[in-house]
Amino acid sequence: MLLTQTHANALSRVSSLVAKKGVIEENDKETKATILYEYHDSPVGGHRGMNKTCREIGKKCEWPNMKRDIENCVKKFPSCQVNKTSGLRPREPMEITTTARNPFKK
């Protein structure tokens, strides 16, 4: 019988952490830091941004002021701030045009 050894990935470790707790206490900073690291900072987390990170963490656990903690975590990373896309679309510059004196004339 051949046994294969598998390595636990980051998110499986978080799942085992969260399975114990579900709702994390406000003063449990070590667990929150581990979860934030695994869901955002780690290579597996992928620096997905505040909304996606919040949604994924919310599926597994919750704690008071979770959204604020995630926002602060994401704002700390310069690479996230540099690479984030702006929600504003570039607009054409305004031009002064003349009013047509006759219909269908420019």
Image (cartoon, rainbow, N blue to C red):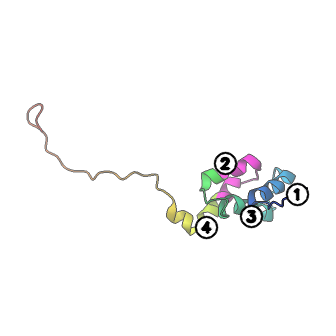
Within 10 Å of disc 3 (Cα), the crowding (few <14, some 14-19, many 20+) is: some
User: Mark 4 near mark 1, Cβ–Cβ under 8 Å?
Assistant: no
Viewer-proximal residue among 75 and 26: 75
In the image: residue 21, left or right of residue 46 = right
Q: Is mark 3 on a helix, strand or loop?
A: helix
- Magenta region includes residue 64: yes
Amino acid on which the number 2 mark rests in the picture: Arg
Amino acid on which the number 1 mark rests in the picture: Leu
Q: Position of residue 36 (x, y in %)?
A: 71, 60
Q: Where is residue 95 in the image (x, y as percent from the top left)?
A: 21, 50
In the image, which residues are magenta? 54-70
User: Residue beneath label 4, please?
Assistant: 76
User: Residue beneath label 2, please?
Assistant: 55
Of the two numbered discs 4 and 2 on the same chain, state the one appearing first in sequence: 2
| 94 relative to 34, above or below | above
Q: Which residue lies furthest to the left in this view?
A: 102
Of the two numbered discs 2 and 3 on the same chain, state the one appearing first in sequence: 3
Separation of marks 4 and 1 at Cα, in angstroms: 46 Å
User: Residue beneath label 1, please?
Assistant: 2
Separation of marks 4 and 3 at Cα, in angstroms: 13 Å
Amino acid on which the number 4 mark rests in the picture: Lys
In front of the other: label 1 or label 2?
1
Within 10 Å of disc 2 (Cα), the crowding (few <14, some 14-19, many 20+) is: few
User: Residue beneath label 3, please?
Assistant: 33
